[in-house]
Image: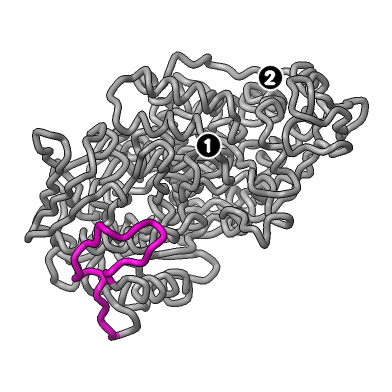
Amino acid sequence: MRSARKMRAVACIASLAAVAAVLAGCSSSKTTTSTGAGSGTPKTGGVVRVAESPGTSPTAIWPFVAANQESTVNINQFQFLMFRPLYFWGVGDQVSTDYDISLGNAPTWSPDGKSVTIPLKSWSWSNGEKVTGQDVMFWINLSKAERANSAYYTAPNPAIGTTYFPDNIVSATASGQSVTLTLDKAYNQSWFDDNELSQITPMPLAWDETAAGTAGKCASDAFDPTAAPTSPMVVDCSADYKYLSSQSTDLATFATNPLWKVVDGPWTLKSFGTNGAFDIVPNTKYSGPQKPALDEVDFLPYTADTAEYNDLKSGSGTKNALDLGYIPAEDTPVYNASNPNAGNPLAKYGYTIEDPNDNTLDAVGYFYLNFGNTTVGGLFNQPYFGEAVQDSMDQQGMIKGIYKGWGYPTVGAVPTKPTGNPLAPDYPTTNNFSTSDAKALMTSHGWNTATTPATCTTPGTAANECGAGVTAGEKASFNLDYPSGAASVATEIQSLVSDAGKAGIQINANAKSQNAIGTDLSPCTTSTASGCWEALYYGGWVYAPDYYPTGESLFSTGAGANVGSFSNKAVDAAIALTTTSNNIKDMYAYEDLIDNTHPVIYTPETWGTGVAINGLHVGKGDPFQGFEPEYWYYTN
């Protein structure tokens, strides 16, 4: 959540609203689930109405997602409500596994570190079937058979002798309430637990269909360890995938399709509108802990944050009032760490600004560069060019001005929050912002910056030339698509366009809806490379479900979430080493390489100013942008 795990990775826009910001994979503004506005005696019942961010409604319901579906909105804020992952992270602001509400108990490892057993709890699906090891095998078989369609997949790299899930599994067997995996070698167990097992969402046998009412074999066949990455599996999963993936994007049937009525989470879908509005109600057959106290939670779409803000001001106290929403950046008070409610413009309307819990946001903000685009790929493949664009990004100025202090800069590929994250090196707390440095980088590499866009006058591969793939006369210009609907984001992009122009870099900014950008978020193919997207501001990356920030899903050659087609042999080798080594210095070496190759352009991480109606308790925050409304309740 991408981004975006991964981009949940994929993918969340750092500057959008506090309540329902995206991706998946993804980083985005902080959700409202922090310290609640209600502190009285809990009561049962009631309906909570939640504002979605502009253009950020769910687009896929099946929790086996492609790269352009891997977003916080789809996964953490929608699918996880109904379909629980094997291991759940984030409840109560904890950047760790919460075994109390996870389907699986803690995994156990063999002495040689090459075998792991996953014990499952005695949970049930809403159709009465038990959640068993075979449900886990369903996911594993599908992930092996449909690698090319999985956002979580990272291709093997024979040059450095490394493989990732599921290619690193030699055998997988289910027995009742447990699954045992044998691996091809010993791995960093923290990495395997946090990044490989975390991908799995057990799937009910009721989903093992190739058409409505026609049973498939993907869940029941034995795991096939011999299938090479480019070969089909013996297991029959292709028909399952074709059918389930088509059903997963049919918005009009989300709430009526019998497939999606089979849930194991605390909520079930009551209704879903093609405009993105949806309502959830408690799953009365939920067998896990923390049963919902509310009767219903309704999510309301908006096309612009100004409309949402007007509803907050006009609807308070009425039947259709918003209970959870956000204040647009331009209307927020200046951030006061000791009293986040200082200057709250909605206090008179009955809302409390939620404590942003800024110390726990496990995300990095950035926009994507498309190294596979044949028009600008040569330009993006020059690390000096990425550095020049980064030097033109005034993160501190944006945070202080546009966002009034509600955020912090992204300074590297590993989150600096929570404070004290041992996997993050001793990063500086600020970024270099210098248009003169950016201009000097361009001129020292053979560009005429007298006008914007600058022109390559010294092509070639020497240190003082434009670089491989850049031709004589080529312009330093690229297109950047960014989300519409939030004035603060538009102002942020305008600032970057202006400052980059001072260095001779022309950025042609285009506003598109968040969901439209998400649809574009996939690698270019040979047939589309010349007309494919060039740069996308989808939002960045929340480290979920790849919680251990080693980067294989983001920056490894051919990784499912590497939608920008970035490829660097040294980076591949450094990432691979972090998956087997327990030496923190190897993690730091990887992070330094990423910072010197510039596969993405870092942007500010903003918390947003989420508000809750007085009398509603929403608990502590989820550092991965998720929602846990089973912890929400009204107070007496």
Side of 195 where 3 appears, left or right: right
- 205 left or right of 268 in image: left
Q: Nearer the viewer, residue 221 or 292?
A: 221
Callout 1: helix, strand or loop? loop
Quickly name the residue at label 1: 608
Q: Which residue is at the far front?
A: 159
Residue at 42% over, 43% down = 157
Under mark 2, the amino acid is Phe
Q: Which residue lies furthest to the bottom in this view?
A: 213
Residue for point 46% across, 38% down: 30
Return the disc, 1 or 2, that comes first in the chain's sequence.
2
Q: Mark 2: few, some, or many residues within 10 Å (few <14, many ≥20)? A: some
Kindly give the residue lying farthest to the right in the view shown: 450
Magenta part of the chain: 213-235
User: Which residue does the numbered mark 2 point to in the structure image?
Assistant: 433
Name the disc covering residue 284, or none: none
Q: Quadrant of residue 490?
A: top right
Residue occupying the point 80% across, 19% down: 444
